[in-house]
Image (cartoon, rainbow, N blue to C red):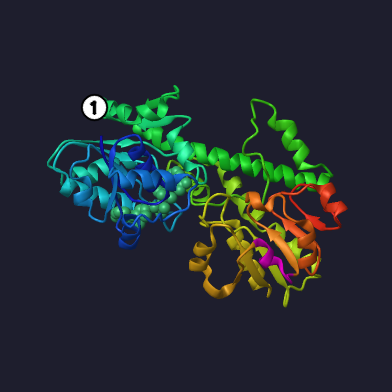
């Protein structure tokens, strides 16, 4: 099939590449000329494990191309995906200016029937707005479909190629047939393509993300309570995770969720609730607790240094909001870097993939280390913000020798308490006893 993807970020590039991998001819459109230039030269613009191999193969075979021109991109397309940003607007609701702007342009440019598929995360009722924006200028027939994306950064290729399910919101039979054909190679194992009305599809995405954010937040609260009550959250996690009604995933406590999706989607669902005069109490608590959780390590660091961080150097391992991505949007590390600097500390950072992005975001305000061990050389303490695999089994002797004080503030519970005790570290983690 001929597919256009408008917006070539995390979702757009992964979707476009994976649809090309299943034999479709895909043109990705982006209005950022540097991005398109780089992609045309064969240089990927995001870090996503496994994507490079598919990207190389499909660009070389001519099934995956890039352009800044919407007109050129959609000319022959039977399906046009919108993978555009939906950032929070000033009031926290999803800002639809990118989606509606492109919809307006599509109405003016489309020369033949196409299915316009909204892959961005958008509030209930957006499909109707997109349809109206296109219809204002369109001279051809078209369908608008809601097809929310559930991929996770870090495992996006796998998620896209083998989705648990595909949700498609449309009541048009013609559009349903086209979507079925497009997704058939990805659901060969029998995973369902679930058809529903547009509004339910739009709501499904927010319900999924808010539920997961709630699950993490619930575990963070259990962890906080464990600290007070002398229980170990790791044991509690195993104890409940083995219950099939609860499940093992999304039960790891930490210093709060971040990323480009959970914070904004929870907030946007809250706005939708307010719009419909519904007091969504759990959602409000999730946001409040998560904001507080991000601040959890700072008082511990301050106390350790008797309230004075001036002149201290704190090393941070991990900047991305989670491992296997270079995405730092709403990452807890950003909050902690700011707080440390505000308190007068110097900060040295290391992340395996997110260094370029953090440089763009905060420039020279911190020192950038070339390796995890360079970051801790002569530092007063180590903080861990992202659970990258290479941080899991480090050389503790090297860490002990490099740090001025053998102290680790671990926001991701990477290490075994008895191991830390045996090695003589002072060790703070989440929902477990302090080792000192
Ligand atoms: P992104 O910011 O990485 O990518 C968006 C791209 O759109 C950018 O490359 C930008 O240059 C481009 N763009 C903006 N305006 C444009 C225009 N007028 N014409 C062409 N291109 C334009 O965003 P993302 O992370 O890919 O997210 C896109 C949507 O998918 C959001 O609604 C997000 O909530 C949703 N989503 C994201 C993820 C994720 O893990 N990142 C997962 C599921 C859903």
The residue lying furthest to the top in this view is 190
Q: Is residue 129 left or right of residue 274?
A: left
Specify whether residue 374 is painted magenta: yes
Magenta-tinted stretch: 372-379
Viewer-side residue, 240 vs 45: 45
Q: Position of residue 267 (x, y in %)?
A: 50, 49
Residue drawn 48% across and 52% down?
47
Q: Position of residue 334 (x, y in %)?
A: 58, 62
Q: Position of residue 227 (x, y in %)?
A: 79, 48
Residue drawn 62% across and 51% down?
388
Q: Is residue 342 left or right of residue 46?
A: right
Q: Is residue 296 left or right of residue 24?
A: right
Query: Does the image show residue 240?
Result: yes
Where the N terminus falls, by quadrant?
top left
Query: Does the image show residue 94?
Result: no
Where the C terminus falls, by quadrant?
bottom right
Look at the picture and state if 366 lies above or below 91. Answer: below
Label 1 sits on residue: 174
| Location of residue 385 by image quarter | bottom right
Look at the picture and state if 243 lies above or below 100. Answer: above
Specify whether residue 279 is painted magenta: no
Q: Label 1 neighbourhood size at 10 Å, few (<14), some (14-19), many (20+)?
A: few
Residue drawn 33% across and 51% down?
7
């Amino acid at each position: 099939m001929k597919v256009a993807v408008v917006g070539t970020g995390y979702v757009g590039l992964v979707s476009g590449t994976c649809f090309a991998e299943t034999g479709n001819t895909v043109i990705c459109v982006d209005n950022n000329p540097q991005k398109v230039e780089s992609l045309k030269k064969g240089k990927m613009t995001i870090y996503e494990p496994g994507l490079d191999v598919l990207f190389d193969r499909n660009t070389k075979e001519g099934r995956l191309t890039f352009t800044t021109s919407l007109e050129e991109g959609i000319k022959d397309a039977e399906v046009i995906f919108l993978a555009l940003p939906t950032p929070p607007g000033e009031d926290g609701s999803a800002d639809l200016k990118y989606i509606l702007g492109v919809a307006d342009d599509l109405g003016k440019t489309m020369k033949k029937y196409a299915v316009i598929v909204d892959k961005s995360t958008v509030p209930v009722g957006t499909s109707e707005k997109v349809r109206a924006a296109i219809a204002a200028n369109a001279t051809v027939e078209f369908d608008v479909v809601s097809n929310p994306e559930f991929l996770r950064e870090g495992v996006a290729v796998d998620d896209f190629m083998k989705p648990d399910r595909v949700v498609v919101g449309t009541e048009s039979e013609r559009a349903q047939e086209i979507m079925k054909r497009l997704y058939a190679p990805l659901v060969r194992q029998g995973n369902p393509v679930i058809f529903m009305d547009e509004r339910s599809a739009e709501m499904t995405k927010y319900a999924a993300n808010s539920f997961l954010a709630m699950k993490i937040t619930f575990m963070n609260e259990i962890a906080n309570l464990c600290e007070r009550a002398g229980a170990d959250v790791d044991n509690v996690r195993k104890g409940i995770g083995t219950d099939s009604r609860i499940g093992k995933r999304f039960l790891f406590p930490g210093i709060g969720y971040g990323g480009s999706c959970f914070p904004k989607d929870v907030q946007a669902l809250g706005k939708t609730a307010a719009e419909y005069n519904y007091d969504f109490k759990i959602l409000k608590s999730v946001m409040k607790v998560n904001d507080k959780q991000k601040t959890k390590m700072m008082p511990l660091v301050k106390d350790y240094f008797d309230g004075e961080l001036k002149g201290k150097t704190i090393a941070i391992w991990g900047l991305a909001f989670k491992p296997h991505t270079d995405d730092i949007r709403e990452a807890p590390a950003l909050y902690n870097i700011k707080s440390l600097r505000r308190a007068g500390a110097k900060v040295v950072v290391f992340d395996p993939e997110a260094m370029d992005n953090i440089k763009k975001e905060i420039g020279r305000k911190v020192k950038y280390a070339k390796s995890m061990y360079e970051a801790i050389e002569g530092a007063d303490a180590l903080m861990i913000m992202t659970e990258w695999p290479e941080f899991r089994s480090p050389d503790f002797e090297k860490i002990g020798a490099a740090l001025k004080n053998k102290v680790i503030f671990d926001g991701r519970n990477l290490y075994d308490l008895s191991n830390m005790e045996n090695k003589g570290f002072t060790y703070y983690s989440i929902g477990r006893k302090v080792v000192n």
